[in-house]
Amino acid sequence: MLGYWDALYFVFVFIIGLILAYLLDKWAKRSGMGTRETGDGTKIFISGEDPDRIIPGFEHLEGNYTGRNVMWGLTYALKNFFAVLRRDHTGLLTDYASYLVITTAFVLGVLLIWG
Amino acid sequence: MDVVSNVVYPVAGLLGLYAFVSLASLVWEGIDRKLVARMQRRIGPPILQPIYDFLKLASKETIIPNTANYMFRAAPILALATAIALLAYTPVGFEPILSGKGDVIVFIYLLTLISFFKVLGAVSSGNPYAKIGAAREAALMVSREPAMMLAIFTIMWRIGKLGVDKPFSMATFYQHNIWEIGTPMSFVGALILLYVFAVWLASEIEVGFFNIPDAEEEIAEGLLVEYSGRYLALLKLTKALKGYIAASLVVAIFFPWGISGYFGLSGLSANVVDLLFHTLKVFVVLFVVQSVFRAVTGRLKITQAVDFLWKNAFLASLIGSLLIAMEVIM
């Protein structure tokens, strides 16, 4: 047996965690100064800029954050590696068939050597 | 089914562990701040400052940004619930409470889920700084985990060959440890993997080089920028718990020895003594990886950090794992 997981206990323990976290939140809500959800104080913080101000020429941009590529840090740091991968995706069926043949030959070779 | 031994004892153990680890991890944050302050020739805050911070934040007004959706409110509670659930699978000087009910994959899954909920809450706030922090956290997360996963799977597979009850259980570390493999190659491999785990721990608790997602001076605490009041308190507690849990993994792999055997203790008192000794070891590991590392290094760019984690830590993990697995494969 290489791995095991009792889902029932997992759900049970997670529910205990949820109850404890919820009770802590409830206690803080009761003893704290309440929650503010309306008014100017609930605008987001962008270093003093007003998020509602429309900048001329940039009306088409929704929100202030334009860098939509979440994985930029990863793809930019390893761009050589990703360039190799991208070059292999030629879109030609013969290339993909050759990858399949090579992989099959490699797996068969490993199986032959190690029995 | 025996209800008392299957439900009542684990729940009581989990509640006790939660109470202890919350206090211990918050006290550690205070010790860490004090030590780093002394290294920088400042006086520093009192050691109990994080506990005061927690109580103060819980009593402050909580502001919900007008751009936030419901996940913004749910994420801190879900993250803390995940951390509490994770405590049941964490080796803390003795076998995890639910060591027979979940293996190492459950542990890694829950540890990653905490970061996932933090990212989810941050992107739900609608703040550009939080989105940048979330993007950095995601890029860092997919870079740091493969090195750790490769190393821990190899170690557990190798320890499993020495004869344990359940391979890949978190309890295996207390039956055999990595230093018992015995060959010179495996000793060198274990030292290399110790380095890998130190880097992983630093990037997991995001200090020093890896303090990129919550860069305070640069993107105004990134992920946490819109959080205030009780939600910030919950997230700070989650961060402290996560630091303790991640360090517990490193301690369990490399320094699993308990002291209850020397005093001839058994039962509950043995567990308490082992837990206290384990906490001491966690503090020592965190002192090296968190306090010293944070005092002597600065923040990397996200591309440099990803580059470092793949080309240095992952490569070291590959070499260390090969050295440990070598004499079984050959």
Image: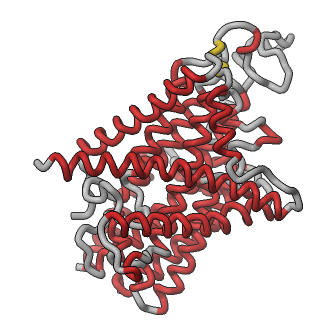
Q: Position of residue B236 (x, y in %)?
A: 62, 41
Q: Residue A79: tell me if it is visible.
A: no
Q: In which quadrant of the rendered image does the C terminus of chain A lie?
A: bottom left
* In-front residue for pair A115/B328: B328
Q: Position of residue B130 (x, y in %)?
A: 68, 32
Q: Residue A92: tell me if it is visible.
A: yes
Q: Residue at x 83, y 64 (%)?
A: B39
Q: Position of residue B138 (x, y in %)?
A: 59, 43
Q: Residue at x 42, y 52 (%)?
A: B17
Q: Residue at x 57, y 56 (%)?
A: B144
Badge count = 0
In this view, the residue farthest toward the bottom is B184
* In-front residue for pair B254/B199: B254
Image quadrant in which you'd find residue B59: top right
* In-front residue for pair A58/B299: B299
Q: Is residue B15 left or right of residue A79?
A: left
